[in-house]
């Protein structure tokens, strides 16, 4: 019971390691999930080769959306932004290690959607980014 | 009123939730559960009397028409309306308000006219007016809500000084639970020369409402929040207004005569009811109001008052939990709250694992949430089938939430 709220998720929610704006970040994007009032902004700083040197987020949301943002950023630091473009829904679910209902899936995928929109330098984030 | 006996009338309470839990249903402000006799009234119609209504010259058509029109009469009686022609069937409250904005608003509002809403409206009593404002260049102003969750009456009176054409407000807030002094507000609107529209989606299901006595010009509500089916609602409007208003949707049933040159509209209420309506749902709606009459709206109101007082008291013990909305003396059985540091979605999700259904989000009232500077809230709402045990389960669930997030 309450397996959704594994200790690791609560820990990332309460003590996120990557919360905070990254100065001089080349990529940033913000979006919200109006259904639940979640708001997320992601900052990515890369070197000339596109390797992510640092990443951060600002915003507020539920435990699932904040934990997924923190875990996603943790997993992509040191990787090339091209690799992030290839990340999918399943990668996020693997990070979280839980099953989610369709409504909660939106919470979990907000961070990947925002990160991809930042990398593609879009004006608007589309759900298709995380299909 | 015996809640255990009442629960037996609602078959959904026989089911088990995941983890084998009983259903603790605290989401009636979103939609209510349905008693057997409502479900059966619709089944019976489809099995025995199904036909299209009006105009038909055969036994089934006559029976169907009789059942549908009897429901209209029962609903009129239920809200204290003497003339059942003043009951227009719509899809729901939202469509009823849209009907007024589209038909009355387009005909009678002119550029520069002012209409008043309140800060506690849900989207269905805001957006139709925004749409109209864009088209007709009218102005909208919002009567303020005080921190305590009641309307700022001084502000209302000062806004009336600007001679609004319409005052549209909710009888009972779906977030704060606030019951507005509707009769007084209508009276003041009339004194200022304004028409009144009252959103009764939350009030008609839970407290005795007499629309004739309130003297409201328009009054809207939905069946599905008061034990009836989805897909049917009511717009009450005074006959004189209905006579002055152009039709809403065009089609069958709303016409008297159609030629290649044009049409003439049918009599009221049919003028506003184009196409084949939700016949079975109308009959189910009639069964719902008859069930509510049988239990008694005063008994239901008293029961919910007691439960609300009990719930407010229970939740008050939980640290970092903040209730928004007034005290029990000014509200119905809607309790919205937030807990510092825990998102409403997480609260609702953890409660769900215990079979407890509450709502998390903005409850279709985003402006009201921004007025309270919170992105969302959790809402527990009660009805005649809820008991103190349900509130105890809610409290235990919330303590579990606190433990998980400690």
Image: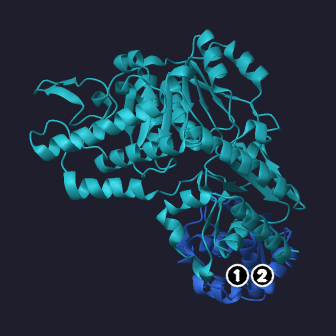
Chain colours: A blue, B cyan
In the rendered structure, the answer to whether residue A89 lies left or right of residue A62 reads left
- Identify the residue under disc 1: A4
Q: Is residue B374 visible?
A: no
Q: Residue at x 42, y 36 (%)?
A: B75
- Work out whether A17 lies above or below B54: below
Question: Is A101 situated above or below B180?
Answer: below
Question: Is any atom of residue B262 visible in this view?
Answer: yes
Location of the N terminus of chain A by quadrant is bottom right
Q: Position of residue B306 (x, y in %)?
A: 73, 47
Check disc 2: other Cα within 10 Å, few if <14, some if 14-19, many if 20+.
Answer: many
Image quarter of residue B70 = top left
Residue B115's quadrant in the figure?
Answer: top right
Q: Which residue is mark 2?
A: A9
Vertical order, B182 against B41 (above or below): above
Question: Residue B338: x percent and y percent?
Answer: 79, 57
Judging from the image, mark 1 belongs to the subunit labelled A
Q: Are marks 2 and 1 in contact (CB under 8 Å)?
A: yes
Callout 1: SS: helix
Label annotation for residue B218: none
């Amino acid at each position: 019971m309450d397996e959704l709220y594994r200790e690791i998720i609560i820990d990332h929610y309460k003590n996120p390691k990557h919360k905070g704006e990254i100065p001089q970040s080349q990529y940033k994007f913000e979006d919200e999930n109006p259904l639940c009032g979640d708001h997320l902004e992601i900052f990515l700083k890369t070197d000339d080769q596109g390797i992510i040197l640092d990443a951060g987020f600002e915003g507020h949301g539920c435990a699932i959306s904040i934990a997924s943002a923190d875990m996603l950023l943790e997993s992509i630091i040191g990787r090339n932004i091209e690799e992030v473009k290839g990340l999918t829904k399943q990668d996020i679910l693997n990070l979280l290690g839980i099953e989610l209902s369709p409504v909660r899936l939106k919470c979990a995928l907000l961070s990947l959607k925002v990160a991809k929109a930042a990398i593609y330098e879009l004006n608007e984030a589309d759900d298709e980014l995380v299909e | 009123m015996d809640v255990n006996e009442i629960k037996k009338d609602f078959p959904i309470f026989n089911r088990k939730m995941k983890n084998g839990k009983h259903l603790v249903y605290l989401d009636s402000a979103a939609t209510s559960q349905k008693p057997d006799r409502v479900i059966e009234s619709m089944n019976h119609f489809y099995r025995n009397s199904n036909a299209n209504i009006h105009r038909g010259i055969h036994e089934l058509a006559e029976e169907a028409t009789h059942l549908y029109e009897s429901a209209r009469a029962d609903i009129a009686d239920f809200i204290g309306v003497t003339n059942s022609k003043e009951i227009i069937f719509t899809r729901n409250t939202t469509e009823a308000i849209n009907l007024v904005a589209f038909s009355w608003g387009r005909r009678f509002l002119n550029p520069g006219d002012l209409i008043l809403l309140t800060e506690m409206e849900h989207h269905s009593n805001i957006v139709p007016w925004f749409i109209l404002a864009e088209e007709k260049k009218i102005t909208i102003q919002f009567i303020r809500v005080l921190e305590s969750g009641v309307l700022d009456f001084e502000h209302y009176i000062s806004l009336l000084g600007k001679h609004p054409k319409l005052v549209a407000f909710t009888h009972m807030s779906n977030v704060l639970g606030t019951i507005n002094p509707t009769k007084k507000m209508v009276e003041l609107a009339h004194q200022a020369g304004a028409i009144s529209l009252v959103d009764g989606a939350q009030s008609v299901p839970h407290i005795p409402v007499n629309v004739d006595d309130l003297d409201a010009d328009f009054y809207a509500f939905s069946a599905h929040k008061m034990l009836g089916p989805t897909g049917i609602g009511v717009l009450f409007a005074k006959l004189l207004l209905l006579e002055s208003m152009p039709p809403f949707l065009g089609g069958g049933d709303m016409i008297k005569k159609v030629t290649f040159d044009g049409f003439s509209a049918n009599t009221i209420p049919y003028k506003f009811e184009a196409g084949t309506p939700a016949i079975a749902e109308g009959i189910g709606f009639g069964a719902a109001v008859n069930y509510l009459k049988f239990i008694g709206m005063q008994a239901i109101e008293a029961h919910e008052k007691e439960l609300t007082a009990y719930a407010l008291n229970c939740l008050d013990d939980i640290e970092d939990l903040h209730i928004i909305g007034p005290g029990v003396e000014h509200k119905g059985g809607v309790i919205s709250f937030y807990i510092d540091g825990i998102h409403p979605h997480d609260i609702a999700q953890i409660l769900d694992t215990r079979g407890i259904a509450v709502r998390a989000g903005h409850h279709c009232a985003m402006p009201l949430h921004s007025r309270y500077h919170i992105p969302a809230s959790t809402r527990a709402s009660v009805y005649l089938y809820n008991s103190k045990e349900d509130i105890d389960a809610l409290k235990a669930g919330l303590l579990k939430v606190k433990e998980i997030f400690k």
